[in-house]
Structures are given as structure tokens and as C-alpha cells.
Amino acid sequence: MTVYLNALGLICALGRDKQQVARSLFAGDCSGMRDETGWVPERSLPVAAVKGPLAALPAHLSRQHSRNNQLLLEAALQIRDDIDQAIQAYGPGRIGVVLGTSTSGIDEASRGIAHYLRDQHFPAHYDYRQQELGAPANFLADWLQLSGPTYVISTACTSSARALMSARRLLDLGLCDAVLCGGVDSLCQLTLNGFSALEAVSDQRCNPFSVNRDGINIGEAAVLFLMSREPGTQQPIALLGAGASSDAHHISAPEPSGRGALQAMRKALSNAGLAAQQIAYLNLHGTATQHNDAMESLAVAELFPDGVPCSSTKPMSGHTLGAAGALEAAFCWLSLAADNRQQALPPHVWDAQPDPQLPALRWVGSADRLATGAPRCLMSNSFAFGGNNVSLIIGDAP
């Protein structure tokens, strides 16, 4: 079944709405990645943070305050008119909320617990519900007074890609007429220190697929699509296909041959009824770790023996963890959008020093453009701890 991605709200280090993000994305602008101290003891690290004040939650929802929910509110406000039209058309009980996150409000919770350990009482603004993984979806449903299915998926860095898959399933089963779906993750000490302990965080801007790559940069983002069975009034963009696998190779390291990644990509193509040659662009997971880039390049080279234009966008956005799948699907959406009159694609930003041990891939440069005419189909990869793999295909609606 074809489902349409009729509206998009997003905020990340590249910008605070889709116009700003598109402008920075297609220019290869990495200025949102800045060195900061205070996240990891005795280290200054590049992080992709959203700068400036965020929208305040309504007073009656103040117990749900977290930076995560503030980011989500910023994305939702951008498409509030579309959401209100859907509520009028379908009713609040027929609209679902499916989001992905990996941290929810754990930053506020961890500071509250630190306060308790120091002073033997929690601060007045502490609420244990801030840290629950379901908090973002519950907040959005409470704010909009929706009563359809409402839940969060948390599968590490595939969380929001799986949220889009799950939203499509709700529509397919007839349980919803529209679904607000996407993902949100905010910067917090837990993730930065965790990845630092794994020796996976780079002290420089990340350098995907380079021989000099040495780890990830963490970012934050909120992404919200309005998904429906009915096309919107503007140029229709659809979720054409999705595929997932779980190779369970290791708790944190990817399966080195790329078997699980390849399976997810093949499932997405089969689900969309497409051949690999019909993919016009591939947004790589491309974390710039040794193991991810090695296995992903093997999988891509096998599936696309004649090459496919591809790039990793993480030097610009950072790795936004639970939000990454939806964010990079949004980058594909922006590439297809009618106001992308130059047919631009996200360029691959790196030092242009390929790893001789990896298959050569076809990197998008600043001059590369999407072909016009035939329906355009773009793929986005997301891979997570535990061998959890998802590929999505976004394209012009048939």
C-alpha cells in the first residue's frame, strides 16, 4: 500500500525548519558542528547541537518538560495547520502517534537524580515520567488531544526508521487514517559518555569512509511527518518501501560482511517492487566508525555493482541516534520536494582520502543532480546496536 508523507517538520543543527535545513544540507554546510566542553570529562568534542531558545511547553503540560519534548514541539509547530486539518477530517481517535527515541528525557532525569544524591531530595521540577521512553509520544498526544494509537519505538539508531514502518502498518491495518511519525533525540551526557567509553567518538568532525575515519559525532534533532493514505495538496511524496533485518551478530559491533544490511536493503526493494538500478540516491548510515563503514560499503557494492550516487550526511547533522532514521528520510524528502528546483542532492563531505581496503563507492559531489522526468526513488539506511537494520525507500508517488 502506498502511504504519503504529506507534511514535514524538523529541527537539527542544520536549521530550525525545512527551508533552512535544505539550504544548509545541499550546500554541504558543516557549521552546525561545533566543539563543546562539559559533556565528557576532560574532553572537547564536536557536537551538532540546536542553537538558541526552544519553544516552551504549555503550562498545563509542564510536568512533561524536557529538551527532547521541546525539540519535538518545535517540529510539530511547523506543521500544526496540517495536523489540525487532519484532526478535522478524521477525528482525534483516528490519528496515531509513533515516534522513535533512544534517550527521551534522560538528561533531565539524570540531573534530578544527581540532585537527590547530593541533597537527599529531588528538585521541584523533577518528574520520573520525563525519562520514560514513551514520553515524547505521550506529550504529543496530550498536547494535540489525540486518542489514537500512541507509542514509542526504541531500537537505538533505527528507532525512528522503524517508527515510519510501524506507522505505515497502522494505516495498512485500518487502525488509523493518519499518523504523526518520526523521531526525536537530544544531546545528553549519557550517550556522549557511553559512546566515548566505547572509544567510538571522534575528536574531529567525523570523516565517513575515509582511511582516516576514527569515530562518530553526536547530534540532536526532531523530525515529524504526517503520514496518510491520501496524498496532500502539494507534490505527493511517498514511503514506497521498507525493509528490516536483525542479524544479532554482536551487542554493539555490526556483522562484518554486511549480510544484515544487505538483507534490509533487498527487503526494501522487494517491498517497493523496485530493482536496485531504479534507486537514484542512497543516504548511507555512514557513521565514520571503522566497522560500520567497512560493512556498509561491502553491502552497497554488492547490491549496486554498477554504483549508485550516495553520501553520508552525518558530518553536517551529527549522528542523531534515535532520530537519525527519520532525519535522513527527511533529507531524501527534501531532495524530492518541489522547492528543490535545482534537483540538488546532499553532498558527501569528507577529506577525499578513500580507504583502499573498502570497495569504491560513487560519492555525490556538489554538482550532482537528481534526474528529472521518471519517478525518482531514494533509499536511506539505518543500522543499530544488536544487528538491527532498516532501509527505507522514499520517492515520487506513483
Image (spheres, rainbow, N blue to C red):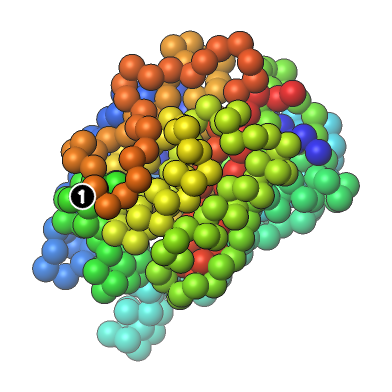
Which quadrant of the figure has residue 132? bottom right
- Residue found at x 38% / y 74%: 110
Q: Secondary structure at mark 1?
A: loop
Residue nearer the viewer, 262 or 126: 262
Q: Is residue 99 above or below residue 223?
A: below
Q: Is residue 249 left or right of residue 142?
A: left
- Determine whether, in the image, residue 397 is placed left or right of residue 249: right
Q: Quadrant of residue 85?
A: top right
Q: Quadrant of the N terminus?
A: top right
User: Is 392 on the left or on the right of 29, as rendered?
Assistant: right
Q: Residue at x 35, y 45 (%)?
A: 359
Q: Position of residue 312 (x, y in %)?
A: 37, 41
User: Circle 1 sits on which residue?
Assistant: 211
User: Residue at image x 24%, y 47%?
Assistant: 356
Answer with left or right where residue 235 lies relative to residue 93. left
Q: Does residue 298 show up? A: yes
Residue 298 percent location from the top left of the image? 42, 51
In this rendered view, identify the residue nearer to me: 19 or 198.
198
Other residues around mark 1 within 10 Å, as few (<14) / some (14–19) / many (≥20): some
Give the amino acid at mark 1: Val
Q: Is residue 280 above or below residue 248?
A: above
Q: Quadrant of residue 396?
A: top right
